[in-house]
């Protein structure tokens, strides 16, 4: 730690010359925020908390300013995108920072005031979200009437959403796996949040086959016809068989692909739980604005992660550092949404917050998590593990003489 502050003093304005600078900054910013913001009034119902708490509001504003100032210790925009214009992506990054600050402020409030804040956007909010506002399992008999009734605004959101998300990943295998994973996440959490319940044919036919797959394949067709670059997330290029894919040989590739899936699982769940805890109906324009903002911002951390994977264990990595600004900002936003969702979970009237998770959900996920963690540790500590960069000798003849 002393070395960190010595470097800051001796090299002003060069924060990213310090090893693990993004990780250090993340911990400095958010350990105090979660420590002081989460415990107070945690899990209280609106009836148990007063509407306006001036002290909490003051602490929330102070914490939001602390996070905003702390984040700006980083460089201005140094990102992977410069089209259509660098200024556009600076604005998107700024929106992400502002949203992070808003969530920080929200975390310091009590339940009643946190929900009341949304009435400044729409006076009709802060009302209990009825289950009837979003339910797809009332009648699971497979009839034309039931089938066609599911082609609603949610179907359009699915179709458009997977079209956009395919442009983020640009990899058929990864994006189709993500599509199916989302359905398993819904099945794993529907006993807690009834809004996630759907009929079997809705999961398989409407969601996966007729909306997700269609949106993905249309996007891949556009990418191919426009000559856009595709992303080799799994390290398949140059491999003679699947055993040589980098995801099975490089801890960095495997770890980041798993991290990516954790990232999107967190974003997917908070899309429901955060809005539910804030009493915002699924079809409200706030939900749409949040979804579009997330879609635009997610381009930055996802491309940043891919560049890290692509350049890992190469000679060019030594002189071309991959920054971690946006991935850590994305992680911070997701963790803050999870924290606020948990803190304000009481009193929604439509969440089974005390429901016990069945063994047939816990067991498979425990096996998956344990297997992935074990495999990552194996790749990370094996003798021939990959390294950040490869040192190419300037004069091979001199190197050979030294060895002799």
Image (tube, grey):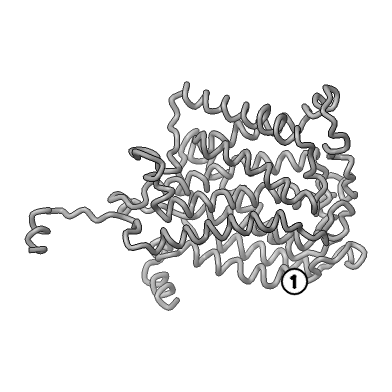
Q: Quadrant of residue 211?
A: top right
Which quadrant holds the N terminus? bottom left
Name the residue located 71 percent from the left edge and 40 percent from the top edge.
Answer: 289
Name the residue located 76 percent from the left edge and 57 percent from the top edge.
Answer: 358
**Left or right, 255 with reference to 239:** right
Find residue 42 and report its horizontal and vertical position in percent. 79, 68
Name the residue located 7 percent from the left edge and 60 percent from the top edge.
Answer: 401
Name the residue located 47 percent from the left edge and 49 percent from the top edge.
Answer: 305
**Left or right, 42 with reference to 388:** right
Find residue 40 and report its horizontal and vertical position in percent. 77, 71
Farthest residue to the right: give it: 47
Q: Nearer the viewer, residue 288 or 13?
A: 288
Find residue 110 and report its horizontal and vertical position in percent. 82, 65
**Left or right, 191 with reference to 158:** right
Q: Nearer the viewer, residue 210 or 364?
A: 364
Q: Quadrant of residue 296?
A: top right
For label 1, the residue is: 39
Q: Quadrant of residue 105?
A: bottom right
Q: Nearer the viewer, residue 79 or 220?
A: 220
Q: Is residue 209 above or below residue 359?
A: above
Find residue 80 and report its horizontal and vertical position in percent. 45, 43
Q: Is residue 285 above or below residue 275?
A: above
């Amino acid at each position: 730690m002393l070395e960190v502050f010595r470097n800051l003093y001796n090299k002003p304005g060069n924060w990213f010359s310090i090893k693990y600078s993004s990780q250090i900054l993340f911990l400095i910013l958010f350990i105090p925020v979660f420590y002081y913001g989460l415990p107070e009034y945690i899990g209280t119902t609106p009836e148990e908390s007063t509407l306006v708490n001036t002290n909490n509001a003051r602490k929330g504003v102070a914490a939001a300013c602390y996070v905003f100032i702390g984040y700006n210790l980083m460089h201005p925009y140094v990102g992977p995108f410069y089209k259509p214009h660098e200024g556009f992506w600076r604005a998107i990054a700024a929106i992400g920072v502002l949203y992070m600050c808003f969530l920080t402020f929200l975390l310091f409030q009590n339940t009643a005031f946190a929900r009341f804040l949304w009435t400044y956007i729409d006076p009709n909010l802060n009302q209990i979200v009825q289950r009837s506002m979003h339910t797809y399992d009332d009648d699971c008999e497979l009839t034309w009437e039931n089938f066609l009734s599911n082609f609603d605004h949610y179907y359009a959101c699915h179709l458009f959403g997977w079209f956009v998300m395919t442009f983020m990943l640009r990899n058929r295998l990864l994006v189709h796996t993500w599509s199916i994973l989302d359905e398993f996440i819904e099945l794993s959490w529907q006993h807690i949040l009834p809004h996630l319940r759907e009929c079997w044919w809705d999961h398989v036919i409407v969601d996966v086959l007729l909306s997700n797959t269609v949106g993905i394949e249309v996007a891949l067709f556009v990418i191919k016809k426009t000559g856009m670059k595709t992303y080799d997330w799994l390290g398949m290029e140059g491999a003679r068989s699947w055993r040589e894919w980098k995801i099975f040989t490089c801890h960095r590739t495997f770890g980041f692909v798993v991290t990516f899936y954790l990232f999107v699982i967190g974003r997917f769940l908070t899309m429901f739980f955060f809005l539910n805890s804030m009493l915002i109906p699924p079809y409200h324009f706030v939900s749409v604005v949040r979804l579009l903002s997330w879609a635009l911002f997610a381009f930055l951390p996802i491309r940043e992660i891919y560049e890290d994977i692509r350049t890992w264990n190469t000679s060019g990595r030594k002189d071309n550092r991959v920054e971690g600004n946006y991935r850590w900002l994305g992680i911070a936003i997701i963790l803050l949404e999870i924290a606020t969702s948990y803190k304000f979970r009481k009193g929604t009237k439509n969440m089974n917050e005390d429901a016990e998770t069945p063994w047939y959900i816990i067991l498979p996920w425990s096996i998956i998590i344990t297997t992935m963690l074990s495999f990552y540790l194996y790749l990370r500590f094996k003798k021939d593990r990959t390294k950040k960069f490869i040192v190419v000798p300037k004069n091979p003849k001199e190197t050979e003489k030294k060895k002799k």
